[in-house]
């Protein structure tokens, strides 16, 4: 059986620069799939672009940690701060989702509203994934499975990244990224025990190498990827200046401007890699079929 790989762009709709990059990476490059983050400023434009690209698989990038909610239900207020924006970090939200029935009801209402927004705008989602992998938290994964069934969406991202990706001959990744990949891999194994019905791939690539996706990474995918059917996460973007809304973390000696500039550079490198003739040739030589979730 030939290997099948989905190359997905997260954050479709986040910003005009992301939208332009998604269109370019699909039209001129290897991008087969993208997921719309429905509550972000450029989501409407992302829908317009998606309608013009019928071969692009489009899913929903569920989000509970950035921006304002789509749902108008009163129950969602428990997820928000005084300004009406999402209040909790992914880690805190994961803990609250275990302990609080009220929180789970709010999560269900908001995620349903985000999926419905995409459908109401004329798109048929191929799959569901999420910002910061929040759908992998076991209590939230159960909700997402129920919503996939309700909205007749066939697939949910399976966040199991093989541990082999964190060591040679794969490109070097940071210890922090490797640790994050281990944690998400553990949750993915729990997800598989919870409900495997919507898990259509064998693996996810790009967690440990987030921010390091380039031509060399794609070469490694074609040479060393152990999975028959998998997804590669990418975050391409084009910005005229620094990407908006990035804040320095406490204790980080880098300035906000330095972080923004680095993020813009990394996203541009990913776009260039997706459109690289060399990377395309690697996949062609390996006989890998590039598909989206709707083609599995």
Image (cartoon, rainbow, N blue to C red):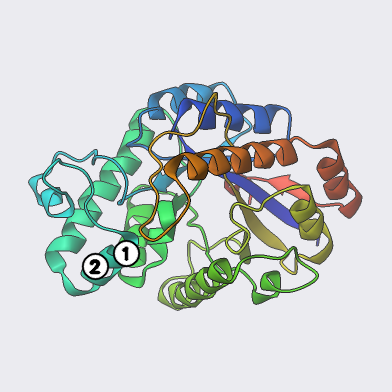
Query: Callout 2 environment at 10 Å: few (<14), some (14 to 19), or many (20+)?
Result: some
* Outermost residue, right side: 285
Q: Can you give x and y, in whole percent of width and height, for residue 117 in the image?
A: 32, 35
Compared across the picture, whether 79 is left or right of 245 comes to left
Q: Can you give x and y, in whole percent of width and height, for residue 86 in the image?
A: 23, 48
Q: Is residue 146 above or below residue 192?
A: above
- Residue on which disc 2 sits: 97
**Of the image marks 1 and 2, the number of the one nearer the N terminus:** 2
Q: Give the alpha-carbon distance from disc 1 to disc 2, as whole Å.
A: 7 Å
Q: Is residue 45 above or below residue 287?
A: above
* Outermost residue, front side: 253
Q: Which mark is residue 108?
A: none
- Residue on which disc 1 sits: 140
- Kindly indicate the quadrant of the structure image that contains residue 20: top right
Q: Is residue 50 visible?
A: no
Compared across the picture, whether 281 is left or right of 168 comes to right
SS at circle 1: helix
Query: Callout 1 environment at 10 Å: few (<14), some (14 to 19), or many (20+)?
Result: many
């Amino acid at each position: 059986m030939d290997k099948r790989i989905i190359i997905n762009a997260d954050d479709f709709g986040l910003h005009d620069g992301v939208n332009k990059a998604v269109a370019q990476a699909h039209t001129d490059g290897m991008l087969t799939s993208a997921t719309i983050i429905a509550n972000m400023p450029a989501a409407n434009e992302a829908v317009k672009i998606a309608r013009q690209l019928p071969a692009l698989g489009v899913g929903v990038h569920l989000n509970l940690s950035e921006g304002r909610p789509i749902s108008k239900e009163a129950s969602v207020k428990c997820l928000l701060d005084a300004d009406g924006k999402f209040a909790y970090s992914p880690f805190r939200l994961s803990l609250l989702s275990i302990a609080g029935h009220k929180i789970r009801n709010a999560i269900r209402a908001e995620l349903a509203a985000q999926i419905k927004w995409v459908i109401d705008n004329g798109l048929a989602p191929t799959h569901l994934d999420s910002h910061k992998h929040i759908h992998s938290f076991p209590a939230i994964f159960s909700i997402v499975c129920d919503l996939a069934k309700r909205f007749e969406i066939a697939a949910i991202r399976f966040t199991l990244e093989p541990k082999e990706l964190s060591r040679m001959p794969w490109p070097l990744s940071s210890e922090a990224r490797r640790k994050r990949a281990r944690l998400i891999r553990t949750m993915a194994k729990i997800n598989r025990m919870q409900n495997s019905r919507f898990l259509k791939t064998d693996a996810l690539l790009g967690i440990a190498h987030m921010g390091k996706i380039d031509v060399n990474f794609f070469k490694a995918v074609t040479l060393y990827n152990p999975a028959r059917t998998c997804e590669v996460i990418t975050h391409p973007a084009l910005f005229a200046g620094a990407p908006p809304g990035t804040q320095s973390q406490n204790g980080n000696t880098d300035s906000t401007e330095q972080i923004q500039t680095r993020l813009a550079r990394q996203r541009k490198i990913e776009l260039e890699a997706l459109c690289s003739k060399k990377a395309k040739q690697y996949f062609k030589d390996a006989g890998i079929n590039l598909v989206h979730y709707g083609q599995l």
